[in-house]
C-alpha cells in the first residue's frame, strides 16, 4: 500500500463519515443554517483531505486481500444487515427507523391527531441510516436494504484498513481475530448459571449486572450503527495519535461521531484527551477544523438531541439503585476479570509503548457500569466500544511481536475461549428460519416504553428556530375515525353500548364491537385511546390476529398498532374483550384514528 492509495482511502474515510452529516444538515435545518453548517463541514473535510502525509509501506498479498474482502462480505451478510439473513430483534428498530426516514419528509415528524396539531419529531442518532434512506427515497425499499448492506461492508473495510495502518502489518489472520474477538462469556455463563447454554443463545448478559462487553460480532449483528462508528472513529483517532502524531483534526473527528452515536462519542473523549499529549505541536489543536467546524456541528447536532423527550434520562442512576449490588458485586468482579482483566495482565509490560492508552481504556471500562443510563444501559454497553478496540489493538500488537511464547500462548488460549460468543451469534443466524425482524414497521407503531426513546418533544428550540418549516409538510391522510363507521355487537354473554363504544362482561368471554367498514388493500397505522378495568382487551383484524393487545387494563391507555390488508386477509376491525375466551371486565374505546400509510 503506497502513499497514493493511502490518501485515496483517507479521502474515502472522511467522505464516508461526513456524507450522513451533510444529508442531515440539508434535510433537517432551515436553508440559512443548512448552508452555514454545510460550509463548516465542507471546510473541515477539505482541510482533512488536503493534509497529505508520508506513510509506511505495507506488504500486501493479493490472495490475502481477496479472501479478507470475501470474509468481510460474508460476515456482514450473516449479520442480517440488508435483510439477506436472519435479523436479531434489534432490527425491529433498525427497519422501522430506516422505513420512516424513507417514507416521511425530513425532518421526520409523526402526527397523532386528526388535524395534525399533535405532532412530535424523530430524535435519534440517524447518521448510519441516512445514505440508505436516501437510496430508498429514490429507488424503493429493496435498494435501500442493498445500500445498507454495502454501506456497512464499506464501513468495516475502512475500519480494518486503519487498524492495519496502526499495527503496521496486514495479515488475513488479523481479520479472523477481529471477527472472533470477545471476552470469555462462556466461562462466566457456566459459573453463574451452573449450566451450558444452547448453541444459539445470546451470552453477553450472563453477569446480570446491566452491563456487557460485547464481542465485535455481537456489536455488528445487533447494533451496527454503534459498531461501525466505534471502530472507525477510534481507529482514526488512534492512528492520528500514534502513527501520524497529527492533532489538528481530532476534535473535528470526534464531533462527526456525535450524529453516528453519542455514546461512542462519549467513549472517545478520554482517548481524545490522551491524543493531546501525542502531538507534534500544541498549536495544531487550535486548527480551523477543530475550532470552527467542530463547534458548528456540535451546536446544531446538540440542539437536535435536546429536542428529545428525555425518556432515556428517566432511566438513569447508580447501579445500586437498579439492582441489589451487595448480592451481585461478585458477578461484576467476575465480569471484569473474564472480559478484560486477564487480557490486561497479559498485555501489560513495562516497555509497552503507549501503555497509558491501555490503562485509560481499562479504567474507563471499569467505571462505566457504576452508572446506568437507559433501560438496557445503552450508555455503558456502547460507550465502551472505543476502549474495547484499544484493547484489541494492543492484543494484535502483542501477538505480532510475540516477545514471549508463554504470554502469546496464554493470549491465544483466552482468544479461543472467547470465540464461543461470536460463534454462537453466527450459529443463531444459520439455524433461525424467520429472516426479517420487522414487527414494528414504523416507530409510530412501537411499544410506548420504546417509542419514547425515539420521539422528541412537540416544541423545542431546534424545531422552532433551527429546523425546516413543516407548515407545508405532506402527512399521512386520515382514513378513518371512531365516529365515521357503524359498529355492531359481536359475541355473546356481554353487554354492549354501541353508541359509547363500550363492552362489559362479568365472566370470561370473546365479545366486542365489529366495524362495518372494510379497509381496502394497503397498510394502515392505528392510534387508539382505550379506558376501563379489564383483562385481555384488544383491537383485532377480524379473523386474522390482534393488532393491539392489552393483557391488563386499569385506567386509560394510548396505544398504536398496524393493520395490513392484502388479497388474503380481511380488512375489518373488532374492538372488545377476549382471545380464547379470556376477556373480562369493562372497557371503552375513547378514540380511534386510522392513517393510510400506503
Image (tube, rainbow, N blue to C red):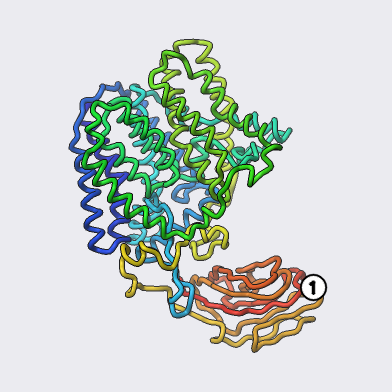
Q: Is residue 138 visible?
A: yes
Give percent across and percent down for residue 579. Answer: 72, 69
The image shows residue 537, relative to residue 221, as above or below, that is below
Instruction: Name the residue at 35% across, 27% down.
Output: 164
In the image, 39 versus 104, the foreground residue is 39
| Left or right of 81, for residue 150 | left
| Left or right of 543, for residue 137 | left
The image shows residue 377, relative to residue 494, as above or below, that is above
The image shows residue 560, relative to residue 76, as above or below, that is below
Instruction: Name the residue at 30% across, 25% down.
Output: 243
Q: Would you identify the image quadrant in which residue 512 lies?
A: bottom right
Give percent across and percent down for residue 462. Answer: 36, 62
**Quarter placement of the N terminus:** top left
Q: Would you identify the image quadrant in which residue 304 lies?
A: bottom left
Instruction: Name the residue at 36% across, 59% down.
Output: 136
Q: Residue tagged by mark 1?
A: 508
| Left or right of 372, for residue 156 | left
Extreme residue toward the right, this view: 507
Q: Secondary structure at mark 1?
A: strand
Give percent across and percent down for residue 567. Answer: 53, 72
Question: Few, some or many C-alpha atoms within 10 Å of disc 1 (few <14, some 14-19, many ≥20)?
Answer: some
**Quarter placement of the C terminus:** bottom left
So how many labels did they put on this image? 1
In the image, 244 versus 150, the foreground residue is 244
In the image, 519 versus 383, the foreground residue is 383
Q: Is residue 176 visible?
A: no
Instruction: Name the residue at 49% across, 70% down.
Output: 523
Q: Would you identify the image quadrant in which residue 10 lies?
A: top left
Give percent across and percent down for residue 541. Answer: 61, 73
Amino acid at each position: 500500500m503506497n502513499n497514493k492509495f493511502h490518501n485515496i482511502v483517507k479521502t474515502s474515510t472522511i467522505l464516508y463519515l461526513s456524507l450522513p452529516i451533510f444529508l442531515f444538515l440539508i434535510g433537517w435545518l432551515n436553508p440559512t443554517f443548512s448552508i452555514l453548517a454545510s460550509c463548516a463541514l465542507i471546510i473541515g473535510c477539505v482541510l482533512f483531505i488536503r493534509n497529505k502525509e508520508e506513510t509506511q509501506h505495507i506488504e500486501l498479498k493479493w490472495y490475502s486481500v481477496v479472501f479478507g474482502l470475501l470474509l468481510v462480505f460474508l460476515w456482514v451478510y450473516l449479520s442480517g444487515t440488508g435483510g439477506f439473513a436472519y435479523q436479531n430483534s434489534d432490527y425491529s428498530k433498525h427497519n422501522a427507523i430506516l422505513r420512516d426516514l424513507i417514507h416521511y419528509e425530513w425532518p421526520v415528524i409523526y402526527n397523532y391527531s386528526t388535524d395534525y396539531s399533535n405532532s412530535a419529531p424523530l430524535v435519534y442518532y440517524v447518521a448510519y441510516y441516512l445514505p440508505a434512506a436516501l437510496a430508498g427515497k429514490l429507488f424503493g425499499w429493496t435498494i435501500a436494504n442493498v445500500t445498507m448492506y454495502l454501506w456497512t461492508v464499506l464501513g468495516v473495510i475502512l475500519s480494518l484498513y486503519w487498524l492495519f495502518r496502526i499495527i503496521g502489518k496486514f495479515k488475513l489472520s488479523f481479520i479472523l481475530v477481529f471477527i472472533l474477538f470477545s471476552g470469555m462469556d462462556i466461562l462466566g455463563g457456566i459459573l453463574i448459571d451452573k449450566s451450558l447454554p444452547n448453541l444459539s443463545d445470546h451470552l453477553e448478559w450472563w453477569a446480570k449486572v446491566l452491563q456487557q462487553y460485547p464481542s465485535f460480532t455481537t456489536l455488528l449483528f445487533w447494533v451496527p450503527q454503534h459498531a461501525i462508528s466505534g471502530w472507525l472513529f477510534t481507529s482514526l483517532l488512534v492512528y492520528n495519535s500514534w502513527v501520524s502524531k497529527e492533532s489538528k483534526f481530532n476534535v473535528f473527528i470526534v464531533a462527526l461521531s456525535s450524529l453516528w452515536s453519542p455514546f461512542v462519542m462519549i467513549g472517545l473523549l478520554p482517548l481524545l484527551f490522551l491524543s493531546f499529549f501525542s502531538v507534534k505541536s500544541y498549536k495544531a489543536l487550535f486548527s480551523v477544523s477543530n475550532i470552527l467546524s467542530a463547534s458548528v456541528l456540535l451546536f446544531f447536532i446538540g440542539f437536535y438531541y435536546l429536542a428529545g423527550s428525555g425518556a432515556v434520562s428517566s432511566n438513569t442512576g447508580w447501579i445500586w439503585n437498579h439492582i441489589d449490588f451487595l448480592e451481585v458485586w461478585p458477578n461484576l468482579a467476575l465480569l471484569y476479570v473474564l472480559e478484560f482483566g486477564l487480557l490486561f495482565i497479559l498485555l501489560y509490560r513495562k516497555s509497552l509503548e503507549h501503555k497509558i492508552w491501555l490503562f485509560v481504556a481499562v479504567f474507563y471500562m471499569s467505571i462505566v457500569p457504576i452508572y446506568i443510563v437507559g433501560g438496557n444501559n445503552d450508555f455503558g454497553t456502547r460507550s465502551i466500544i472505543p476502549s474495547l478496540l484499544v484493547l484489541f489493538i494492543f492484543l494484535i500488537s502483542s501477538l505480532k511481536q510475540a516477545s514471549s511464547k508463554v504470554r502469546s500462548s496464554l493470549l491465544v488460549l483466552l482468544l479461543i475461549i472467547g470465540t464461543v460468543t461470536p460463534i454462537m451469534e453466527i450459529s443463531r443466524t444459520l439455524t433461525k428460519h424467520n429472516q426479517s425482524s420487522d414487527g414494528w414497521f414504523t416507530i409510530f407503531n412501537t411499544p410506548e416504553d420504546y417509542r419514547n426513546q425515539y420521539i422528541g418533544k412537540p416544541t423545542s428550540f431546534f424545531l422552532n428556530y433551527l429546523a425546516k418549516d413543516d407548515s407545508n409538510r405532506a402527512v399521512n391522510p386520515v382514513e378513518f375515525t371512531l365516529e365515521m363507521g357503524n359498529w355492531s355487537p359481536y359475541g355473546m354473554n356481554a353487554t354492549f353500548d354501541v353508541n359509547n363504544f363500550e363492552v362489559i362482561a362479568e365472566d370470561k368471554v370473546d365479545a366486542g364491537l365489529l366495524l362495518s367498514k372494510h379497509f381496502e388493500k394497503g397498510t394502515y397505522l392505528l392510534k387508539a385511546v382505550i379506558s376501563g378495568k379489564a383483562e385481555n382487551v384488544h383491537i383485532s383484524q377480524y379473523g386474522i390476529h390482534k393488532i393491539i393487545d392489552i393483557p391488563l387494563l386499569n385506567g386509560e391507555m394510548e396505544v398504536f398498532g398496524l393493520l395490513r390488508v392484502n388479497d388474503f386477509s380481511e380488512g375489518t376491525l373488532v374492538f372488545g374483550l377476549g382471545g380464547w375466551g379470556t376477556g373480562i371486565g369493562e372497557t371503552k374505546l375513547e378514540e380511534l384514528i386510522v392513517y393510510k400509510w400506503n
